[in-house]
Amino acid sequence: MKPKHSGFFHTPLELLLENLGTEVVVLCGFATNSCVTFTAHDAHMRGFRVVVPSDTTAANSGQIAVDALRQLELTVHAVTAESSTVDLARSA
């Protein structure tokens, strides 16, 4: 459970991911333009590569989700392809 918008804020997520040797985080959930975006930016700032499959997030409208995914592509270089086409081995 996270207390705020980012999965990293006041949670042990960063420590857990580091201990597991994680290089890529795959994010999904609601809302693409809020919680998913905050977590993606925090992951990127911590040196993780970010994958946000476009069909695994949602927002209050389809256009808001599309716009947020495009912004994540531009700002954190997130992979935003559909989940069935994401090659996690290649992303790592």
Image (cartoon, rainbow, N blue to C red):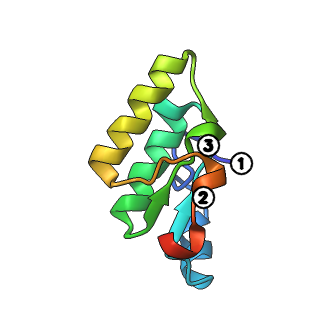
Q: Is residue 7 above or below residue 31?
A: below
Q: Is residue 2 above or below residue 11?
A: above
Tag of residue 3? 3
The residue singled out by tag 2 in the image is 11
Q: CA distance from mark 2 to mark 3?
A: 8 Å
Residue in view at x 56 percent, y 84 percent: 21
Considering depth in this image, is 4 or 86 the residue closer to the camera?
86
Q: Is residue 79 above or below residue 14?
A: above
Circle 2 sits in a helix, a strand or a loop, which is it? loop
Looking at marks 2 and 3 on the same chain, the residue that comes earlier in the sequence is marked by 3
| Residue 37 position within the rendered picture, expressed as x and y whole percent measured from the top left | 45, 41
Specify the amino acid type for callout 2: Thr
The residue singled out by tag 1 in the image is 1
| Residue 30 position within the rendered picture, expressed as x and y whole percent measured from the top left | 63, 33
User: Mark 2–mark 3 contact, CB under 8 Å?
Assistant: yes
Which residue is outermost to the top?
61
Circle 1 sits in a helix, a strand or a loop, which is it? loop
Q: Is residue 72 left or right of residue 55?
A: left
